Image (cartoon, rainbow, N blue to C red):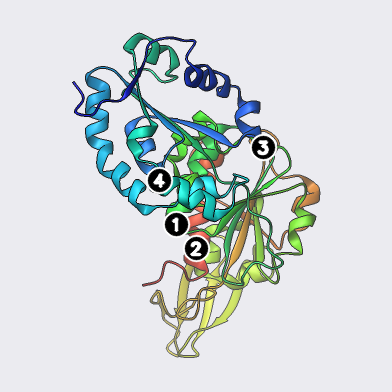
């Protein structure tokens, strides 16, 4: 069935099978910095960062089809010569790892697993017959100072793996520079989080800290936002940034546009109007009332979000520069954490000049 002659496994007593079963214990996997990925797309994404420690293929049509799709990625990861994932967590020197990985053929890492045994290993329904064990990157140390252009998201005591995975996928797609965990948190490398993030955690710098006060000193002059129902509507930040500068929702705010024409902004409705000498009101163009950084160099920011059940702690909220809200018109009392993160991350990126062509 397979063109190559791979080592076959049919017993639960096999050393790699036993080790894989043991690594499904989250604490053990965390201690050894191991992640187990299932499914073609997730494994294919992880191969962009390096070869797995081992790759299980179901010894049937699923595994054959999986290998056909993964072969180009395996070849590329093999000739790339240096496993980026292993480099961040192993004690060997970089030269030792480089020599070792270059000497390894990806085929030596593949095992064919008897179908029923593979299904016993799989943790997903309708498995695609592909399961890979990778070392995951270590958390990055906090730099002395984050660059002023950095975009960061801070998550305080986040507990839901689905929310975390979705947030990681969103901010990585938007080009954020990193994610900082505050306090206890769900692992970004457990199976549910990885499926929700579609592997984006491998390409986003992750940091850990106990408290926001510990991180604040690394943020220079970076503006720190958080979500609060009483905060400035996000739309006002986009249409009238002076409202956010004053840290409160204003009924009116004055701004100067490039033409030096007086502008009145409705902080409640988020409507911008230009008042001309003829006292007529016209909507003005998107570049007339520049949001912070627009048409200039983008200006960094940080967004703090809290635990799904309890939100941001009062201590952390007191350290923030601006409270933001997302106005809702329906009957829902609040938004899901991941949904709020997506809206605020995109809105702040636009407000700070990152989404301007």
The mark lying in front, picked from 4 and 2, is: 4
* Left or right of 84 in this view: 79: left
Q: From where the camera sits, is residue 49 visible?
A: no
Q: Are marks 2 and 1 in contact (CB under 8 Å)?
A: yes
Residue at which label 2 appears: 349
In the depicted structure, whether residue 259 falls above or below residue 315: below
Please report whichever mark, 2 or 3, sits nearer to the chain's N-terminal start. 3
Please report whichever mark, 1 or 4, sits nearer to the chain's N-terminal start. 4
Q: Are marks 3 and 4 in contact (CB under 8 Å)?
A: no
Q: CA distance from mark 1 to mark 4?
A: 37 Å
Q: Quadrant of residue 356?
A: bottom left
The residue positioned 56% from the left and 71% from the top of the image is: 149
The residue positioned 56% from the left and 72% from the top of the image is: 299
Residue at which label 1 appears: 174
* Left or right of 138 in this view: 64: left
Please report whichever mark, 3 or 1, sits nearer to the chain's N-terminal start. 1
Numbered circle sitting on residue 103:
4
User: Residue 326: horizontal and vertical position, in percent?
Assistant: 55, 51
Numbered circle sitting on residue 185:
3
Q: Residues within 10 Å of mark 2 (few under 14, many from 20)?
A: many
**Foreground of the two, 356 or 71:** 71
Q: Are marks 1 and 4 in contact (CB under 8 Å)?
A: no
Q: Quadrant of residue 337?
A: top right
Please report whichever mark, 4 or 2, sits nearer to the chain's N-terminal start. 4
Q: Residues within 10 Å of mark 3 (few under 14, many from 20)?
A: some
User: Residue 224: horizontal and vertical position, in percent?
Assistant: 67, 61
The mark lying in front, picked from 3 and 1, is: 3
What is the secondary structure assignment of the residue under circle 1?
A: helix
Q: Residues within 10 Å of mark 4 (few under 14, many from 20)?
A: few
In the depicted structure, whether residue 290 falls above or below residue 176: below
What is the secondary structure assignment of the residue under circle 4?
A: helix
Numbered circle sitting on residue 44:
none
């Amino acid at each position: 069935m397979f063109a190559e002659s791979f080592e076959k496994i049919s017993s639960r007593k096999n050393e790699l099978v036993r080790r894989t079963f043991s690594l499904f214990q989250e604490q053990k996997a965390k201690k050894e910095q191991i992640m187990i990925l299932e499914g073609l797309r997730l494994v294919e994404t992880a191969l962009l960062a390096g070869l797995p420690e081992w790759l299980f293929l179901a010894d049937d049509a699923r595994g054959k089809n999986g290998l056909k799709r993964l072969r180009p990625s395996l070849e590329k990861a093999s000739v790339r010569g240096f496993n980026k994932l292993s480099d961040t967590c192993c004690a060997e020197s970089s030269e030792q790892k480089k020599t070792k990985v270059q000497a390894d053929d990806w085929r030596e890492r593949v095992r064919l697993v008897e179908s029923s045994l593979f299904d016993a290993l799989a943790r997903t329904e309708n498995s695609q017959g592909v399961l890979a064990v990778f070392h995951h990157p270590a958390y990055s140390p906090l730099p002395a100072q984050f660059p002023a252009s950095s975009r960061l998201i801070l998550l305080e005591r986040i507990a839901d793996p689905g929310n975390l995975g979705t947030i990681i996928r969103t901010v990585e797609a938007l080009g954020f520079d990193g994610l900082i965990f505050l306090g206890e948190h769900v692992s970004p490398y457990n199976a549910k989080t990885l499926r929700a993030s579609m592997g984006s955690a491998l390409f986003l710098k992750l940091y850990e800290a106990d408290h926001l006060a510990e991180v604040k000193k690394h943020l220079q002059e970076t503006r720190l936002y958080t979500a609060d129902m009483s905060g400035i509507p996000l739309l006002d930040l986009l249409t009238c940034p002076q409202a956010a500068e004053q840290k409160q929702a204003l009924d009116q705010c004055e701004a100067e546009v490039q033409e030096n024409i007086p502008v009145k902004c409705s902080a409640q409705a988020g409507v911008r109007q230009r008042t001309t000498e003829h006292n007529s009101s016209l909507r003005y163009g998107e570049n007339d009332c520049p949001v912070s950084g627009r048409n200039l160099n983008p200006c960094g920011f940080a967004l703090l979000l809290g635990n799904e059940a309890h939100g941001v702690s009062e201590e952390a909220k007191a350290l923030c520069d601006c409270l933001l809200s997302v106005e809702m018109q329906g009957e829902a009392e609040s938004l899901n954490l991941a949904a709020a993160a997506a809206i605020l991350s995109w809105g702040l990126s636009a407000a700070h000049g990152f989404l301007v062509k």
